Amino acid sequence: MFTSLPPTRLAILTLLSATATFYFIYKSHHRHRRLLTRLRQTLTKPSLQNPNSKRGKLFFISHTNTSKTLAQRLHALLTLNDLPFDIVDAKDYEPEDLCKENLVLIVASTWENGEPPQNGGFLVNWLTESADDFRVGALVLKDCKYAVFGVGSRSYGEAYNAVARGISVKLRKLGANEVVGLGEGDVDEGALDEVFDEWSEKIVGVLKGNLGEKDGDFEVGSESEGESDYSDEEDDDVNGEDDGESGIVDLEDIAGKGPSRKSIVEARANGKVNGEVPNGEKEMVTPVIRASLQKQGYKIIGSHSGVKLCRWTKSQLRGRGGCYKHSFYGIESHRCMEATPSLACANKCVFCWRHHTNPVGKSWRWKMDDPLEIVETAIDMHSKMIKQMKGVPGVKAERLSEGLSPRHCALSLVGEPIMYPEINSLVDELHRRRISTFLVTNAQFPERIKMLKPITQLYVSVDAATKDSLKAIDRPLFGDFWERFVDSLKALKEKEQRTVYRLTLVKGWNTEDIDAYSSLFDIGNPDFIEIKGVTYCGSSATSKLTMENVPWHTDVKEFSEAICQKSNGAYELACEHVHSCCVLLAKVDKFKVNGQWFTWIDYEKFHDLVSSGESFTSKDYMSATPSWAVYGAEEGGFDPQQLRFKKERHHKSTR
């Protein structure tokens, strides 16, 4: 064929053929050389499976150990997937070393006023100062990749996960590259574990190269246009031959291996609130919270109430003694129902005996159940729990029969009862059944206290005597918590029925402010002051209290005696219950008549007074206190008609 072509055209075709052959040989050699170069770079970089490689850092910033527990869980997951990380307490780390890190993961809690917990203060301050200091530069962390998960509560409004959000912004300003979007968990919405696990799986997926896959190729979005050493054609070839078969992403190369921004689903609670009901109202008790409370022995009533059988109810059913209310006020513990119409609270106290498994909130924002339904269901559930005591060794048949008809209701089970909008109607239903009411409020809703109808005995928790200590102990949601606290005491002063300050002593937290406590007496002018040692409820991720924080009864007595002296004779030591480490102070001018204490209650007289519709005072339904309940009595507040039972303890005491 070529022989028929003119010599000139043949020469041109020969030249073009040679040129094309040379070009393709050159391109093949060039691509091969680049592949070899890239392979050598990969082999010389630290590998995740190389024991000598640079290990990632997993930091936790935590106060109540929630973030620490989550970090430990993530660390176990990373280890399970052969991803080497060191788990680090932020307080033990030198922030200046961040520039040496290739990858950091941070699980951070937000504490009071949007501030970091104490163990993360130095690290967060360093990031803040460095990000705002032009001398540091915006690329100081350019080789560092990061991901942050925040632990907080939406109940705190704008402060929700402020620490985690701030850390993420500061790291980005310092040049670090975010590999997985900010994760945010809400400890009070009941979905924290699920949200965190989802975020953790993304971390593992990115590290192992399992996210961002598309038709066998990984999406690479970190390189800007013109930065690549390869042409588009070369990238397609190389990715197909190399990256598509790699199951491991090097720590230093991880920035380009994550999913694109559009494909990231951040690990945060979604817009649909857990527990939403068809009419759009939210149920207070989500399935997760319900399961947690039921595990603790609660019987959940409707969507926001609960009832539980008290250990002292069981004790008096067996004739083994009653609680301190039996000694101080004459209630029958085996006929007492412990309940609440609101499992939610506006505080997150450090000594919460429910370990913060209940919801929190500043106002009522949930579906509301009918008060009659709550009362009837509570009595029914309580009676069923009493029936289950039949056959238990020591249970008296007579007491079991009496226990089926409760005569007292302690509205102090958990949460804040007066948050329930229909609290007065609920109290009416109880009083109509001649069931007395002992209602406890946490002193954050003064207006609700003012509108309360007569209660058999109304309590205000006085957990601390100064603004700073109250903030540290109660961890209130309200910014104006101290003003609300003081106004609640003032509202208590206006009540004509029996009122009580309840002090819970926590060694190392609130036992030193004797003068400050005494200054609060005139504000609320309570009839009684209950002083009780904190009950240790075991260790948890939400509490740092130990047995060292639990005072002995002698400690409680010393504190009570000191408080009495500060009252200048207005209060005296009236009763004590040694078993509960509890002491009662009472107003001398009201409840000490001719040298005898009248701290007990004439319950039938109270119900008659309520039914009359006429006004009455605490002096109208008081009753004489038995000698065995008086402070200093040999019985120590234990009813001599009961049989004292002491458990045999075989464990070694740490006290």
Image (spheres, helix red, strand yellow):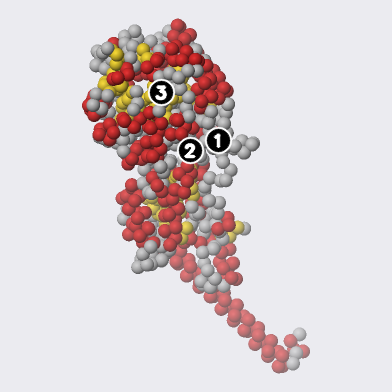
Residue sitting nearer the eye, 294 or 112:
112
Q: Is residue 441 visible?
A: yes
> Label 3 amino acid?
Glu
Residue at mark 2: 361
Q: Residue at x 63, y 81 (%)?
A: 20
Image quadrant where residue 326 sits? top left
How many neighbours does mark 1 have within 10 angstroms: few (below 14), some (14-19), or many (20 or more)? some
**Residue 207: x, y in percent?**
48, 54
Residue at mark 1: 366
Mark 2 or mark 3, which has the lower sequence index? 2
Residue sitting nearer the eye, 224 or 625:
625
Tell me: residue 91, above or below residue 569. Answer: below
Extreme-top residue of the structure: 398
Query: Do callouts 2 and 1 mark residues in contact (Cβ within 8 Å)?
Result: yes
Mark 2 or mark 1, which has the lower sequence index? 2
Image quadrant where residue 559 sits? top left
